[in-house]
Structures are given as C-alpha cells and as structure tokens.
Image (cartoon, rainbow, N blue to C red):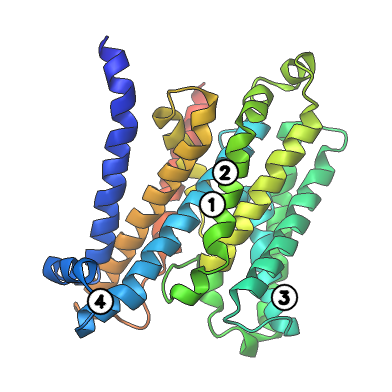
Amino acid sequence: MTGAVRKPLIPVAFALVTVLAAVAHLLAPGISPRTLVGVLDAAPQGLQERIVWELGLPRLLTALLTGAGLGVAGFLLQASLRNPLAAPEFTGVNPGAVLGLLAGMTLGLFPADSVTGALAAALLGGAAGGALSWTFTARGGADRLVVGGLLCSAVLAGLTTMLLAYRPDRFGNALRWLIGSAEGRVWDHLGFVGWWIPVWIALMWGCSAVFAVLAGGDDHANALGVPPHAARALALAGAVALTAGAASLAGAVAFVGLVAPHAARWLARGGPRAGVPAAALAGAVVLVAADALAQLLTRLVSGGALAQRLGVPTGVVTALTGAAVLIALARKERTA
C-alpha cells in the first residue's frame, strides 16, 4: 500500500521541484519577489519588470526547452544503445550540430541571429555526426556505436577548432556556442524552436513501446518482430532532431543528456511509456537549476550588479557537475 501511494507522489514532488527551480531561476539575477509578482499580475512597468519579461522569461523557457530536448535525446541514446554512458556529446550528434552552426555562419548561409537558419545548420551537422557514428555499426552492435561516436566526436571537435582558427573574425560569440549558454535569448528566438522540441518529444513518446522492446536486446527485439537496426535508427533520428533544436537555442550544453536519463529512471516507475516525459522533466529541471546557479555565480563575479552583459556560461556549470556524475557512473560500471 505504501508503494502504491508513493508512485503518484514522485511525479507530483518532481513537478513541485520544477516550479521551485523556475522561481529560483527568475530570482537569481537579483530580481525581488515583489517585482516577479508584479510581472505576473499586469503588463511590465518598471525597469526590473521589463528585464524579467524581456530577458528573464525567455531565458527560463530556453533552459526548459533545451533541458527537456537534451534529456529525451540522452534517454533515446541510452535506451537504444543499452549503454548508461551514451549521450549526445559522446555520439557525434552534439559536436556535429555545433560544427554545422559555425560552418553555416562562416559560409554566410544564415544571419547570426537567425534561429531558423541555426536550426537547419544544426540539423545537418547533427545528422552528419550521427551518420558518421552510424557507419561504425554497419557490422557491429550498440557497443561499437558508442566507441565510434567517441571517435567521431573527437574528429568533429578538431574540425571545429580548425574552423575557429581559420576565421576567428567571424566568431565573436563562438564561446557561447562551444560551451553552451541560455543567456541573451529573447522571445523572437523561441518562435520556431518553441514548437520543434515539444513536437519531437511527443513523437518519441508515441514510440516508447518500440524503445522499450529495443532496451531488452537485439535478440529480444527480433523475437517480438521489431527490427533492431530500424528501431535504433528511429531513436537516433529523434536524438539528432532534439539535439539540433537544443543546440540552435543554447549551443553545446554538455552532460544534461547524460544526467537526465538516470534521474528519469528513478522518476519513471509507471512503465516504459513514462520514460520519455520523465527524461524531459528531469532534463528541464537540471538545466534550469544549472542556469540559475550560473546567474548566481555571475552576480558574485560582477559584485551583484543586475543584468550583466557577459555572464558565467550555463555549460560551465553542467560540465562541472556532469563530469562528477560521469566519474561516478564509470566507477559503478567497473564494479558491476
């Protein structure tokens, strides 16, 4: 009876944590609670209320969407590859998306502030990175894809470095794309990607049964009539689409796709269909909390000044925390 009562309480508690993280995110730059209530009650009037409406809320939604997209992308990769260390940054998808973004800027294919152009370039780059990794599984299994993904990620990162060295004048804000940050996003940036990521999350949720079968192994999938290579290709396509959407908004935010699926497994105790929404919720909470911490660190560095132009990138916080989680997971795998 106790277990039956606890099951519905887990998502409720996590939803409450999401709300608290969102409020903390809006207050992190130094906004007073009274100002925040004023924004919710009426149209923004004062300077602080305009900062919340024009910068704070878009940044919060950017963190929510990016975190949810990366969380589901990591869940798809870990479920389809049956590897707890699989993540967008380790399978060629995230490095490919960032390389596509920077290459598109270098060639002048889209303006630097064009979200639609950035998404298209990130999609092409992420698909190319994923395809390079996929070639390593032509005659191998999921483990070989992980190894191939690491190699492809290293190659793509090297190409990105060469691109930056070749045309440093074109990348004044390259650090934002390379490390990842939700800073500087406004309402115009959310127009296209604002529906792209939720739609792909919904599509992947509809395919949850396929991914649940694939998680049991290729032999299990074949026995149930599910082609493992086709199911894995579907998961990779979803991971590429979600990672590209996230990269076009916030750049190469690392380790969210690694951490969120592990939190989702603890959260999703209602069956395989709960995995995708749980990963989306976990990823959103992780990135919102990380971005709130980044804003607090910015206030400490800048002496408490409000709305600093340059802040601590969100990717720095996720990299530091994610590295610790990666070490813990690696040690757990070694002792298992």
- Local crowd at mark 1 within 10 Å, few (<14), some, or many (≥20)? some
User: Percent x, y for residue 298?
Assistant: 29, 72
User: Type of residue at label 4?
Assistant: Ala
Q: Which residue is mark 4?
A: 43
Q: CA distance from mark 3 to mark 4?
A: 40 Å
Nearest to N terminus: mark 4 or mark 2? 4
Which label was assigned to residue 148? none
Residue 184 percent coordinates (x, y):
43, 77
Q: Which residue is mark 3?
A: 103
Q: Which mark is residue 202?
A: 2
Q: Nearer the viewer, mark 4 or mark 2?
A: 4
Helix, strand or loop for disc 2: helix
Labels 4, 1: front one: 4
Amino acid type, callout 2:
Ala
Q: Are marks 4 and 2 in contact (CB under 8 Å)?
A: no
Name the residue rendered at 46%, 42% in the picture. Answer: 260
Which mark is in front, 3 or 1?
1
- How crowded is the residue under tag 2: few (<14 C-alpha within 10 Å), some, or many (20+)? few
Between 330 and 146, which is closer to the camera in this rendering? 146
- Proximity of marks 2 and 1: CB atoms separated by less than 8 Å: yes
